[in-house]
Image: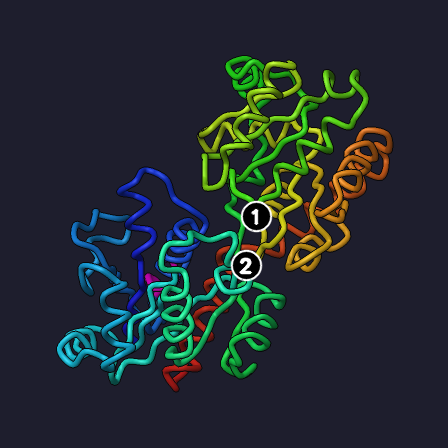
Amino acid sequence: MRVGLGVTVWAKGCTAGHLDGIGVYTRALWHALNNKAQQADAGFSLHPFAFGSSLPLLDCGPPYRLGERFSVHALRSTLLGAQGKLSKNVAKQIDLFHATDHHIPRLKATPVVANVMDLIPILHPEWAAANLRSLKNWLFTRTVRSADHIITISEYSKRDLIDHLGIAPECISVTPLGVSPEYFERIPQPSVDRVLSELGLQPGFFLFVGTLQPRKNLTRVLQAHKSLPAATRRQHPLVIVGRTGWKADKLLTELDALELRNEGRRFEYLSGEMVRALLQSASALVFPSLYEGFGLPVVEAFAARCPVITSNTTSLPEVAGDAALLVDPLQADSIAAAMQEILEQPKSTAQRIERGQERALRYSWDACAESTLDVYRHISGRRT
């Protein structure tokens, strides 16, 4: 079985110098699948494909170019049907195509498996760019429905696909994400101390990791932290790691004020090792997102033995289970109460850390790859 893997978002992220969640997923899935493909009895091979005018060399090698712009392909194929020439060229190379991102091609004679992480653009258009929003959502819906099978990352997202796009349950498979092994590895304390010294931090801060955008709910995290007693805010400042997204002007002003009060710090970008050092040093990761298809930072924090405060909505209770403090993300006082509980009930916090470690061990990229292979085998109609 020759499998084509869509790597468009991965390629774009490498060109830009920053991988988003889908890029991280695609790269991790490639490596996990590629390890399996090297086995003597694997019975499948991987071949990268991407849309783009100038594609970088990736870990998986140079991708085969499907076209210059996915938006042009999607509009044309939606209105006129699958392109014959492209379909023939792809069919010569692969037996099945897996679109790991939202760049889902229409192909004749080649079955397409498509990842749909969530339906945020449709369910919450206010969080997406307004430019051509209606057209983009129409194209997104049509391309998703054109796929032969859908892979999503949580039971919550599966229900959204059934309820809002009318996808048949049997056409959707859930393959949870994995956590990279380095999150389980303890960074030596001298190295952690060097990171903290470089950043001007002391252990015990509250940590927020995520893009500055409305969905991540940082405004209420700031409100919650500001409501804590002054002595607590000074002893347990709020540390934010995240690049600037959209609708962030007010947030940036509030972050400047936070730093002026000496009650927190904001870093736009830190290396993966530095973030892991922060997770090992934080009182808790505060992640009360308004919507997540999965919420990988929660599991990464579990692996790093960092307590977690997260939302009691969307996919987050499914992923976190009883290993995190669940809060109402719309209530700053609920977030603040959880912060206080983390600090005031160390025994309960320690128990949740142990449950988090156990839970994180369930999520591996190898398991994700094996579940994905099961989908390939089912769709291709043959077992290997």
Q: Nearer the viewer, residue 2 or 24?
A: 24
Q: Do residues under tags 1 and 2 come within 8 Å of each other at their CB atoms?
A: yes
Amino acid on which the number 2 mark rests in the picture: His
Q: Residue at the spot x=43%, y=66% of the render?
A: 115
Q: Main secondary structure of the magenta part?
A: helix
Q: Residue at the spot x=49%, y=62% of the render?
A: 117
The image quadrant where one finds the C terminus is bottom left
Q: Nearer the viewer, mark 1 or mark 2?
A: 2
Q: Quadrant of residue 174?
A: bottom right
Magenta-drawn stretch contains 117 = no
Q: Residue at the spot x=77%, y=34% of the render?
A: 339
Amino acid on which the number 1 mark rests in the picture: Arg
Left or right of residue 89, residue 96 in this image: right
Q: Quadrant of residue 337?
A: top right
Local secondary structure at mark 2: loop
The image quadrant where one finds the N terminus is bottom left
Left or right of residue 123, residue 37 in this image: left
Q: CA distance from mark 1 to mark 2?
A: 9 Å
Q: Nearer the viewer, residue 299 or 73?
A: 73
Left or right of residue 281, residue 11 in this image: left
Q: Is residue 372 above or below residue 257?
A: below
Q: Sort mark 2 into few (<14), some (14-19) or many (20+) by Cα contacts within 10 Å.
A: few
Q: Residue at the spot x=61%, y=48% of the render?
A: 299
The residue at which mark 1 appears reads as 215
Across and down, in percent, residue 363 comes to 58, 55
Q: Is residue 148 above or below residue 309?
A: below
Local secondary structure at mark 1: helix
The stretch of residues the image draws in magenta is: 35-39
Magenta-drawn stretch contains 37 = yes
The residue at which mark 2 appears reads as 124
Across and down, in percent, residue 278 comes to 58, 28
